[in-house]
Image (cartoon, rainbow, N blue to C red):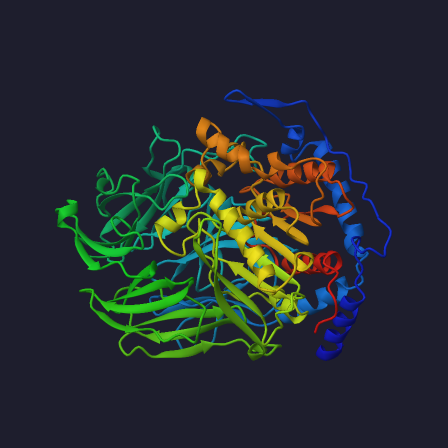
């Protein structure tokens, strides 16, 4: 089918959309599977809290497996009944089919980058032996499994470009196995490193081995749900078994402390950046790299502020920090006299939020966030502003990696209506030239992004991006998807998604609210949405929905809300607090049980943002908004499709399982409450393209049905 005829088919299908909520149709009540139950009641500081669906916390029990299978049958039956589903899937697939590149990383004159021809489940790693050479494949993860569910979790070439350390993740798990490949031959060495999580490989300059972090081997059956503590850092020498790796850092007195090893580009120092939890608050140790028996020396930090190592000039270390600079600055610390009063401020705090800093070509390349979009500035090593990098528009630029003496670097630029283009940047002249640009099967000029500012409940101004067809009407009839996150100091910046474009082709608007809790405006913005202040995030999101309705972008019956992970918590909290405000809800892989999240895998690390039910005061705040514990029986909840995955070992699927079962039992009207449970998938990273497309198509089909979307206008 040609493009235009396929779009016409979608439009016709949308125009014929039916909905269980339409007044002219009889009610179609749902019969949901019976979930396994228990009489479990927990006592939190004198408050008794029932947890009837506690058995669903065991993903491997027969009862849970049977419930998962039964729920998927209900969900699939509903989705299969939507006539537009196939056309939507076809269009998402068509739009997804374009070339995708990563910015190259340079090692010893070789350029390493990933490339995806369009619909490959996983991107393939290539190398250019010289800049003008033909690409040569180094590693194709699509050959590691028949269904594309084995993904690369990281690729790190040695300094001489001869070896490649790479991590492999199976079925979406956060657990990685690291291996080593000969770049020239494409053959793997015998080396294999097990039980790595949230760690990369850091080569020594001689290429003889690398540092890495790992957790203890989990007890049988606990690998996908047991808590992860007592990380250690080791040094692996190529050609030796993992059991012989040298332990270079541990802290048996602090089970939450973890360390990220870094070898300075000059090869003289080994740095340990200690962290606990998810806050960007660090403690930094270092030692000479050539003194393996020397104890690391404490340089800076006591987990009170960010200290991100950038580079060094001999004994002078440069750090990105928010110490006495809420939006960030760059300081120089002399390791021979590191007292704070001796620090030198190289790049002072700016009006914008400092996001990232690299040193390339003897210049600082500094990435700022200005109202949640990218500004890049170049400074010399003394901190003098040289120029700004000219970017194509309002969007997100990333990359800019390299070594201090490199003369070039690469970066990508993307926006809500334009896929990533890769640029080569000459640091000395400031010239950007296109290195790779995808050919598209749509016209970006037909879409526009506007940034608006609205007022939250307490008077705080919140920015929001709204993207749709150019000239979209403000008549209150636009189907609108409102997306948010609001946590962990993570900013939401403009980025392209083929699935979102499909939604906009169908006449939908895509709105992204930059909520408190994120990293858009510095540490006070982040802290304004944490712990007992978490309700601010939900108020910000609810205010965004109300503003979109009041300003006639959409109406309640046409408004859907969506979020993943911490954003799934956002959707869960907002739909239980204001079930009257939305036409549909899409909570994805969300943290829904705020009283027990810290008991699974890496959940304890989120206490930085959420607090803990073990604390009496924090328990009160958590219990007040925890989605699972605020589902009130007898409420008419909006049409909802929860999404999760059976191998999610970050936000374990028990959150979504218990939330969905509770919603289904409480639902007081005929709006569907479904759960879509992906198999052989995890939290999202490394998910095969085929599974991503299927999930997106199912979500759009669900919204077309329940929002009663009309033909594109």
x then y, percent, for residue 16: 81, 66
Residue 678 visible at all: no
Which of the pair 552/274 is nearer the observer?
552
x then y, percent, for residue 353: 34, 58
In which image quadrant can residue 380 be found?
A: bottom left
Image position of 276 (left or right of 30)? left
Q: Is residue 40 above or below residue 103?
A: above
Q: Is residue 535 above or below residue 186?
A: above
Which of the pair 91/544 is nearer the observer?
544
Image quarter where the C terminus lies is: bottom right
x then y, percent, for residue 507: 66, 70
Image position of 681 (left or right of 326)? right
Residue 357 visible at all: yes
Q: Residue at x 20, y 68 (%)?
A: 384
Q: Residue at x 40, y 49 (%)?
A: 526
Which of the pair 530/493 is nearer the observer?
530
x then y, percent, for residue 550: 59, 60
In which image quadrant can residue 686 be found?
A: bottom right
The residue lying furthest to the right in this view is 26
Image position of 494 (left or right of 546)? left
Image quarter where the N terminus lies is: bottom right
Picture mark count: 0
In which image quadrant can residue 573 be found?
A: top right
Which of the pair 407/109 is nearer the observer?
407
Q: Is residue 146 above or below residue 60?
A: below
């Amino acid at each position: 089918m040609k493009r235009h005829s396929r779009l016409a088919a979608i439009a016709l299908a949308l125009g014929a959309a039916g909905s269980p909520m339409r007044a002219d149709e009889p009610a179609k009540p749902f019969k949901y599977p019976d979930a396994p139950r228990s009489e479990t009641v927990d006592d939190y500081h004198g408050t008794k809290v029932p947890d009837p669906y506690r058995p669903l916390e065991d993903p491997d029990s027969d009862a849970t497996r049977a419930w998962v299978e039964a729920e998927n049958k209900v969900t699939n039956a509903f989705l299969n009944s939507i006539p537009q589903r196939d056309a939507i899937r076809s269009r998402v697939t068509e739009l997804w089919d374009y070339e995708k590149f990563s910015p190259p990383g340079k090692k010893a004159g070789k350029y390493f980058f990933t490339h995806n021809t369009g619909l490959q489940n996983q991107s393939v790693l290539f190398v250019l032996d010289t800049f003008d050479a033909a690409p040569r494949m180094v590693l194709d993860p699509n050959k590691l499994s028949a269904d594309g569910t084995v993904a690369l979790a990281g690729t790190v070439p040695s300094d001489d470009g001869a070896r490649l350390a790479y991590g492999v993740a199976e079925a979406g798990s956060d657990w990685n196995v690291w291996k080593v490949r000969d770049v020239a031959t494409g053959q793997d060495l015998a080396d294999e490193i097990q039980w790595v999580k949230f760690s990369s490989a850091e080569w020594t300059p001689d290429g003889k081995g690398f540092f890495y972090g790992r957790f203890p081997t989990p007890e049988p059956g606990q690998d996908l749900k047991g808590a992860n503590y007592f990380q250690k850092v080791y040094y692996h020498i190529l050609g030796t078994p993992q059991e012989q790796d040298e332990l270079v850092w541990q802290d048996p007195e602090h089970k939450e402390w973890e360390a990220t090893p870094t070898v300075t580009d000059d090869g003289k120092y080994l740095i340990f950046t200690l962290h606990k939890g998810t806050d960007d608050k660090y403690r930094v140790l270092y030692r000479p790299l050539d003194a393996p028996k020397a104890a690391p020396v404490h340089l800076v930090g006591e987990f009170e502020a960010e200290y991100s190592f950038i580079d060094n000039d001999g004994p002078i270390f440069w750090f990105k920090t928010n110490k006495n600079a809420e939006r960030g600055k760059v300081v120089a610390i002399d390791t021979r006299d590191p007292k704070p009063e001796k620090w030198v401020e190289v790049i002072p705090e700016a009006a914008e939020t400092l996001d990232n800093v690299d040193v390339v070509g003897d210049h600082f390349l500094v990435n700022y966030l200005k109202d949640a979009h990218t500004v890049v500035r170049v400074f010399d090593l003394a901190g003098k502003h040289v120029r700004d990098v000219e970017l194509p528009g309002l969007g997100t630029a990333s990359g800019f990696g390299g070594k201090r003496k490199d003369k070039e670097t690469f970066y990508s630029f993307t926006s809500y209506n334009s896929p990533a283009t890769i640029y080569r940047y000459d640091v000395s002249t400031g010239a950007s030239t296109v290195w790779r640009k995808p050919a598209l099967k749509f016209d970006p000029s037909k879409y526009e992004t506007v940034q608006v500012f609205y007022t939250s409940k307490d008077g705080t101004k919140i920015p929001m991006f709204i993207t749709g067809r150019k000239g979209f009407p403000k008549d209150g009839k636009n189907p609108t998807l409102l997306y948010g996150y609001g946590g962990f100091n993570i900013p939401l910046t403009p980025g392209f998604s083929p699935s979102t474009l499909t939604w906009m082709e169908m006449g939908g608007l895509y709105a992204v609210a930059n909520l408190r809790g994120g990293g858009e405006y510095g540490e006070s913005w982040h802290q304004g949405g944490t712990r007992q202040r978490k309700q601010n995030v939900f108020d910000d999101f609810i205010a965004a929905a109300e503003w979109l309705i009041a300003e006639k972008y959409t109406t309640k019956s046409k408004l859907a809300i969506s979020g993943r992970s911490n954003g799934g918590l956002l959707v869960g909290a907002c739909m239980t607090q204001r079930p009257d405000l939305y036409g549909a809800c899409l909570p994805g892989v969300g943290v829904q049980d705020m009283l027990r999240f810290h008991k699974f895998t890496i959940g304890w690390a989120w206490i930085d943002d959420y607090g803990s039910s073990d604390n009496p005061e924090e328990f009160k705040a958590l219990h007040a908004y925890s989605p699972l514990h605020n589902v009130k029986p007898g409420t008419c909840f909006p049409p909802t499709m929860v999404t999760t995955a059976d191998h999610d070992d970050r936000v374990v699927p028990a959150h979504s399982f218990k939330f969905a079962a509770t919603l289904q039992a409480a639902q007081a009207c005929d709006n569907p409450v479904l759960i879509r449970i992906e198999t052989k998938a995890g939290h999202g990273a490394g998910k095969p393209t085929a599974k991503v497309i299927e999930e997106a198509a199912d979500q759009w089909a669900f919204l077309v049905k329940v929002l009663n979307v009309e033909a594109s206008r």
